[in-house]
Amino acid sequence: MAKILVLGANGQLGSDLMKIFVNTTHEVCGLTQMDLDAASVDAASQLANYTGYDYVINCIATTNVDGCEDNPDLAFVLNSAFVVKLAKFCQEQQSILIQISTDYVLDGTTDKPILETAKPNPLNVYGLSKYAGEIAVNSNCNKYFILRVASLFGIAGAAGKGGNFINTMLRLANEKDSWQVIDDQFSSPTHTLDVAQAICSLIDDKITDFGIYNCVSSTGCSWYEFTREILSLSGLNPDKVKRVSYKDYQFKAKRPQYTILDNSKLAKYHVMPDYKQALEEYLKLKQMINKNERTNA
Ligand SMILES: NC(=O)c1ccc[n+]([C@@H]2O[C@H](COP(=O)([O-])OP(=O)(O)OC[C@H]3O[C@@H](n4cnc5c(N)ncnc54)[C@H](OP(=O)(O)O)[C@@H]3O)[C@@H](O)[C@H]2O)c1
């Protein structure tokens, strides 16, 4: 049994972690922003209230990629400076830090699944602030896992983004006859429940092979292909969605075009499903929850 502290326990990933740990023998404490304000100047002294944990899992972040271009101060305070404090705290406590990072630390100038050894080269403020978070971990504590996740979808929806991509596509399918989705930007869409299960395996199996891991679905696709799959699996017409090129789409923040990650390093300890299986599982869960909500209403 391990003592585990989850930071950002209300978020999309944090809430799935809390769900997974409830069914284990681990002792878990989940903190929200009400318990610990990571943006506060005294975040380090707030952390000092939570000593004696074997693992600290950091799901706190500001995740709105375009929003980070408008508010780089907040991005660097939450995604980098707080992580310096947290990594020092974990080093003092000899806790294992599990820091959640992102595929957006990469520049995406490749066309093959990317290994953990690829050199980061972030293209936007969000990616740069998360890369600074990785450096903060690596330079301030010894026992850590940096898990690079990507294109997350979970039942809670990303607080920072006001939902998730799947919900947006299902809403558009109800509202429109057709709409456009990018067909030349590729990533590894990943269910937060699968990330939570991977973290649980690392803890259950007491893995000490510390370092950076790609923690994503075992396959990837373009946003257009992902949308077709979402619509098909939901019994909707996939032909409603039309292709558009990344070049013709207006974003505030520049995005990497290819960040399908190679997860074979993680697969030694935990096998992730492919993105289609992950999506199917998510849609089943979502339907079950919607059905229960209707029944309970
Ligand atoms: N979403 C994606 O597609 C994606 C892609 C790649 C990587 N990631 C990474 O995955 C991790 C989890 O993302 P997510 O999708 O679960 O994000 P999320 O739902 O937006 O969760 C972010 C969490 O940060 C917490 N938070 C924000 N400001 C805070 C503050 N000042 N003090 C304390 N807590 C604060 C929020 O707490 P409250 O709920 O209490 O406000 C929330 O629980 C992040 O590290 C993110 O960078 C996400």
Image: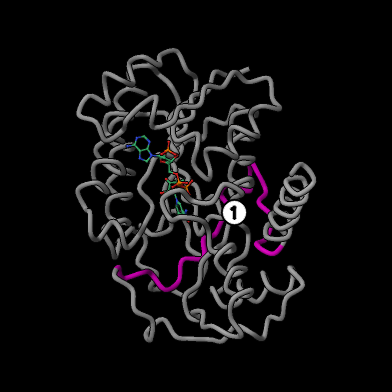
Task: Report x, y in % for residue 23.
Answer: 71, 27
Please give the name of the residue rendered at 38% of the width and 32% of the height, measured from the top-left corner.
33
Task: Report x, y in % for residue 233.
Answer: 74, 69
Ligand 1 within 8 Å, label 1 CB: no
| Drawn side of residue 92 relative to residue 175, left or right | left
* Quadrant assignment for the C terminus: top right
Task: Report x, y in % for residue 201.
Answer: 64, 35
Graded by Cα atoms within 10 Å as few (under 14), some (14 to 19) or many (20 or more), the crowding at tag 1 reads: some
Quick check: which quadrant has ligand 1? top left
| Drawn side of residue 28 relative to residue 231, left or right | left
Please give the name of the residue rendered at 60% of the width and 40% of the height, measured from the top-left corner.
16
| Drawn side of residue 93 relative to residue 280, left or right | left
Residue 232, image quadrant = bottom right
Please give the name of the residue rendered at 56% of the width and 38% of the height, measured from the top-left corner.
15
Highlighted magenta segment, given as a residue range: 253-276
Task: Report x, y in % for residue 180.
Answer: 51, 83
Residue 277, image quadrant = bottom right
* Quadrant assignment for the N terminus: top right
